[in-house]
Amino acid sequence: MSRQKELPLAKKKRVRPLPYLLIAPAMALFTMFTFYPFIRTIILSFALTNKAGNFSKWVGFANWTRVLSKASFWNVVGITLKMAAVNLICTMLVAMIFALLATKKVRFSKVYQTMYALPMAIASSPAAAIFLFIYRQKNGLLNNILGTNISWLTEKPTAIWAVCAMTIWMHIGVSFIFLLVGFRNVPEDLLESAWLDGAGPLQRIRHIIIPMASPQIFFVVFLNIASSFKTFAQIKLLTQGGPANSTKTLIYYIYENAIINGRFETACVQAIFLFLLIFLFTRIQFALENKVVHYQ
Amino acid sequence: MKKILALVLAAVMALAITACGKSASTTTTTTTESSGPVDVVLWTYFGDTNIGYLQKIADEFNASQTKYVVSIEFQGSQSEVNAKIQSTAKNELPAMFNGAVENVATYAKSDYCAPLQSYITADKDGWTQLTGTWDAIRAAYCDDKGNQVGYPCGYSYGGIFYNADMLEKAGIKASDIQSFDDLYAACEKLVKGGYCTYGIGFHPDGFYFNAALGREGIQAYDNGNGYKGTITKCLYMDDAKVHAALTTMLTDYQKLYANNLAIAYGSDYQGEIIPQLASGDCAMMMGVVSMTTKILKSVDGAFKVGIVPMVSATESGKRTGEPAGGTGTFVCNNGNTAQMQGAYEFIKWMSKGDEAAYFATSTGYLAPNKETYDSTSYQEYVTKTFPAISAVYDSLAKSDDSANNPYIPISNEMKAANKLAIQTVTGDPTASVEDAIKTACDSIQEAIELYNAANK
Amino acid sequence: MMTAKQQKKVKSNTSFIIKVILGIIFIAPLIIGVAFSIQTEETLVTYPLKLIAENPTIQNYVEVFRKVPLLAYLKNSVIVCACAIIGQVVFSSLAAYAFVYFEFPLKKLLFTLVLATMMIPGEVVVITNYVTIQNMGLINTYMALILPSLVSGTSIFLMRQYYLTLPKDFKEAATLDGCSDMGFLFRIATPLSIPTISSLAVYLFVQIYNQFFWPLLVTNKDTMRTIQIGISFLTTSDIISYGQILAGAVVAIVPSVVVYIFGQDYIIKGMTAGGVKG
């Protein structure tokens, strides 16, 4: 448990236990299931592990130099960044467009509002089953429609886009609902007066809706950064990192090393690297928080 | 303050009650005598169809005696089962599990597997079927000191299925396809002659890489492929014969794809290759015998299906060894002597002629021992259902032990590196075969060194 | 020549139609899944594929239910999701409330730790957690399935963002009226945050419903397994039948779609009931 000690009286600030109590259950669970394993991950990254993932012997920074000096590792990082960027930008763009389209409630607007978010209710296994059917080479749906005979998932140029397409499709829904709630919270009267002042729709979006909903947008961007780096299921189910490692992202590489190869210490090094990568990008995002987010 | 405590407590209690009230009974961790029959559990990665067959065999075993009751539980894919077993505490382990034959070294060196040898030595009744087992497969399940670790549940075997009618029309004698060069020539003839769109489709697994080397008769790792000592070196670059064989094989792969003679490498064999084989778009498929039933079902009598044994890498390959594949059953070291003995008894039962024949004929796996091969049901299979399989048995009868899999606990990394080499050259006609071999060699070498360092 | 009113109607009608068409295109994969799951295996392998089946059949569904105890799995999935969602809503509301309305030492550090949990890749912690659960003797229990999902950084962060949008005068006014800290949380902040909680619940449902590897690790017996394992069983099955896989996928999708549609309803109701304004 990470309950903090009370500060000594010399600080002259009355420290109440209440906030700590409120956070305590969450912290307890985090400690048990997130922090403790992660500390163990950090420790193991400086050791060699046996097949069961248990400590074998210390090697200091040898793992780090070994992992970080391989060109194949940086290839994977490159692919990770590329896919993360594509996923983040496309998901945010489409989700924002959908949210703006659906902000105004009219009769039956729930029809398309439901449709825009529906894919989020689809878990990755069933979705992968459907997309595998679509991407099949022999009599696959996409080939049927386009009249081509491309093996979308096993040919290098197309595989990465096929995986991204499915990932983006699955992520849009979540961003869409959170953005929608944010956009709909923008007070009607503000928009009315802007419209009366002659502001066009694009200006209303830029100057009113987006700033007022910026806390929500901020949250959605953060969520997307974290999830864009961690998209795993789509790769595991569609391409397993292939063809020729062209869709192997860091998270899949970690899974491969930890679960398939039993090379736990390598996976630990890579996991910490991934964590730092995500941390870096979110740090940047938070640094910009005060500049772009408008809280009441 | 009180309110929040009350709320938290209430929530926790509600959860605890729900959770405890519905939990399944925890596994008993006991070696004491229980009054009823002993539960013997098998963890497997087989799908529902094969589990169905195994269950029938288990039911007959359960009916034949009262001491043990065998049940089967699906635990995910091969790698998921391996990962799970590795991290499972001893008392939570089942009595036995299915594992791939390439991983024998991993299992032999692990804590969670109890090799069969001790049970065999202690068995006063003897295990007749064991002595009648083909040497190639029996040895594949032994450790480097000749102790039996497991026994084949499904004896798989690499080969090339082909459309017999089509090859006959094109004037190609299937038994002449003995090396990768022959394979390339045949594909070229078939496609250029307009008989089909693709000459061949490959089941995308690194297993075939080693199988080709095995058929060649060369060992790609030092210390007798791990049987004369721990493997310390991958010989792809250092051994001229190995290097030459790999160059030939990978160049042939590259040429096949550069000239569009094969189905995209990496395609799912069930979804893409078998349908195209059945419809006549593709003439051949490199796969394993366990795919026979699926192929025969897909083809549905449209043409005769044949099979030739796995080809060697080059023309000069010896082609006398038989690289074994498939799944075996291993006893889990879970501390419960009764369960483990039950596991051994069941493994023995599964190897009996009729039982093994039932599994083999239903799936297409080979008969693991002579008693199975001679049984009525299997003989019927050989004569009526899939006569072409006799080509494989002929080859088996003449085989020696020159084609053993490397005895090494890093088989997943090895297969992945080999598969990557194939994918690199097939995906890019200009890729350097030399670089592909070197990359594979370096990754495997690193994996070997890492393993040895971590497990001194 | 149309009147201005008619013009406006045409404009809003076309806009509506475009939005609906966009929606249909967007959910095309779902339509595809359903449409092809009722076709026979033969039609699925013949070219060309037809969207509307000529001889629709439910055979695929029958087979799927026969092979996999889907209903039992669904029940388990739903129980796990419900418990986990309740836990997350409670614990994260409490924690977020603390982060927004209180100042206390180490607040910034603790919040960074919370955010950090969102950045830790799950695949490395899963094995360690499996060992922990084994040590606690919880294999094959609901507790094992629920425990690691009882709290998440996402929930805390979302609730924190929401509480930040509430005007500061709310709390001040309440305190002046004699409302305690906890009273404010229960009687004012939480009711106001119901739309956010609803969207969080829907999001969490899908997340936890989606879990595959963790349930696979901590359960051995069929009786305790969840739906994703059932679906994967169909795809790793020995004889793959695309129709059955799609049927299984559709069955797995239905509950989460239903939850979403009803959850979405609730979000709307909450918002129109004068939930959050300014």
Image (spheres, rainbow, N blue to C red):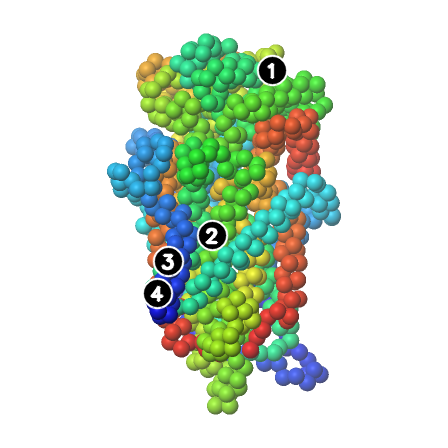
Q: Secondary structure at mark 1?
A: loop
Residue type, label 1: Thr
Q: Chain of mark 4?
A: C
In whole angstroms, how far apart are the C-alphas of marks 4 and 2? 45 Å
Q: CA distance from mark 1 to mark 3?
A: 64 Å
Q: Residue at x 53, y 84 (%)?
A: C169
Residue B93 versus residue C163: which sits nearer the camera?
A: C163
Residue at position x 43%, y 58% from top? A117
What crowding class fits label 3: few (fewer than 14 Cα within 10 Å), some (14-19), or many (20 or more)?
few
B233 in relation to B20, above or below:
above
Circle 1 sits on which residue? B314
Q: Report which quarter residue B22 is drawn in.
A: bottom left
Q: Which mark is residue C17?
A: 3
How far, Cα to Cα, is label 2 from label 3? 24 Å
Q: Is residue B73 above or below residue C131?
A: above
> Could you tell me the amino acid type at mark 3?
Ile
Are there few (<14), some (14-19), or many (20+) residues within 10 Å of tag 1? many
Q: x, y percentage for residue B413? A: 60, 35
Name the residue tied to disc 2: A170
Which residue lies at the image location 66% right of the left edge and 83% below the top edge? A13
Mark 2 and mark 1: span between their CA atoms? 48 Å
